[in-house]
Amino acid sequence: MKTLRIILVLLVLLILIPFAGHILWRIEPQRQLGVILVDKSVTDICRSSHLPFLWTLNHFRFTKSDGKPYDLATDYYGFLPLAPENSRNFEVKRIRLEDIEELSDKNDVLFYADTKGITYGEWFMGASGEKKGSTIKIIGGLNQNDYFLLKSMYDKNKTVIAEHQFFSSASDPLVLNKTAEMFKIDYSYWNGKFFPKLDTAKNPDLLPELVASYTKLYGKPWHFKGPGIVFIRGSRILVLDQNDLLSPIPLIVTPKSKAAEYHLPDTIQYPGWFEISGSGPANEIFAEFYIPVNDSGRARMEREMIPVHFPAIIHSRQKQSLWYFTGDFSNCRIPYWTRNIKNWEKISVLHSSSPQKTTNFVWRYYIPLMSKILDDTYKRLH
C-alpha cells in the first residue's frame, strides 16, 4: 500500500510540475527581438543543428515583431527538409541581395548555426546509410550575400553570432578571407571530436572515411578500442587514446569572473565537434578548450602543430556584440516541447549528469550563455 502511495505521489508530481511550469512561463512578458537564423546543414526534420537555439529563443519569451514565437521548422535561411522525412523533399531558402538592407535594419541578431552545407549524395542517402549520388552541394559555404548581410549587421552594431563550420571549406575563398578578416579570426581547418568508443565494430558514429584516411596515412589498420579524441584536417589525422590522455573528454575552461557574470561553470567537459581557430588582439578569449594530455599526447600534438589550449569562445573587444563559438554548440537533440515550461533548463541540469552526452553541456553551459547574450541585446535596445 505504501509503495502504491509513493507511485501515485510521483505521478501527480510528474503531471503537476510541467503544468505549473507552463502556467508560470505563460505569464512571463514577451520580448520582441528580430532574429535572423542561417543553417545550411539541416539533415533531419528535428532540426537538431539549431534546435537548442530555437528552444532558447522561445523559452525566454523572445518573439518576432508580430508577437508570434519563432518556428523551428521554417524561421531560418538555408536547407529546409520537408515532411514526411522519407519523401526526401526539401526547400532551399536563400538570402537575396535586394533584401539585405531591410533585413539588417529590421533585425537585431544574426546567428549562423552551420554553413558546411549538404550534398545531393548526403540527402538522397540509401536505406543502408551509404551515401549515393553526386557530391555536388545543394547549398553550402559562405557566399557574397552572406558577407554583405554580415557586414551590414556588423556595421550597424547588431549582435552577430557564428559557430563551428562557419569558415567552411565549401565557401567562396574571397568571401571566406574577407569574413575572417572582419571577425579577426585565423581558421586552420583542424577539427576534432571525442568518441566514447574508437572500436569501429561498436561505434557506428565513426565515419568510414575517417578510418580510411588513417589507414592510408599510416599504412596500418585502425586498431583503437577505448575512448579517445580524433583530430582531422583533410587527409591528415591524429588519434589520441587512453595512452595519450589524462582524461578522454576535452574541457572548456572559462575565467571565473566571466563564468560568474554569465552563470556558467568555469570548467565543463564538451564531447561534440570542435575546430581549432586562432584570434588576434582585437578579440578576447572568453573561454578556451583544453585537451588533457600526458607527455606522450602533448608530443604527438606538437608534431602536428596542434595546440593543447585554443579558443572555444571568441568575443570581439571592438564590437561587443560579435561572438564566435569554435564548438558545434547548437547541434543537439533536446526535448523541444519543454521550451514552454519555466525553469526547465534548471530541472534538466539535475538529471543530465553524463559528460559524454552533449545534452549535459547544452543545459549547463550553452543555454545560460546564449540566453544572456540575447538578454543583453534586448536590454541594449530598450
Image: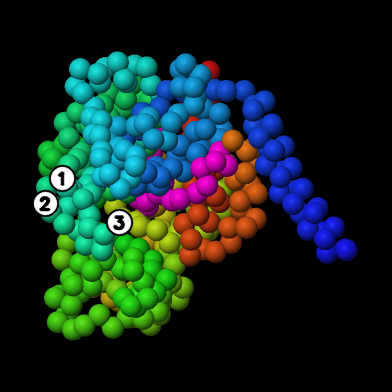
Q: Secondary structure at mark 2?
A: loop
Front position in the image: 135 or 284: 135
Q: Amino acid at mark 1?
A: Lys
Side of 233 where 1 appears, left or right: right
**Residue where numbered disc 1 is placed:** 137
Mark 2 residue type: Ser
Q: Nearer the viewer, mark 2 or mark 3?
A: 2
Residue underneath mark 3: 276
Choose top left, top right, bottom left or bottom right for residue 40: top left
Give how far apart the Cα atoms at labels 2 and 3 are.
Answer: 29 Å
- The magenta stretch spans residue 328: yes
Q: Secondary structure at mark 3?
A: strand
| In the displayed structure image, the side of residue 292 where residue 174 appears, left or right | left
Q: Residues within 10 Å of mark 2 (few under 14, many from 20)?
A: few
Say which residue appears at 34% left-offset and 42% top-offset: 84
The picture places residue 367, in percent across and down from the top left corner, at: 52, 44
Residue 291: assigned label: none
Residue segment shown in magenta: 321-339
Q: Residue at image x 88%, y 63%?
A: 1
Q: Is residue 181 visible?
A: no
The answer to if 152 sits in the magenta stretch is no
Q: Are marks 1 and 3 in contact (CB under 8 Å)?
A: no
* Residue 207: percent from left, percent from top: 26, 66
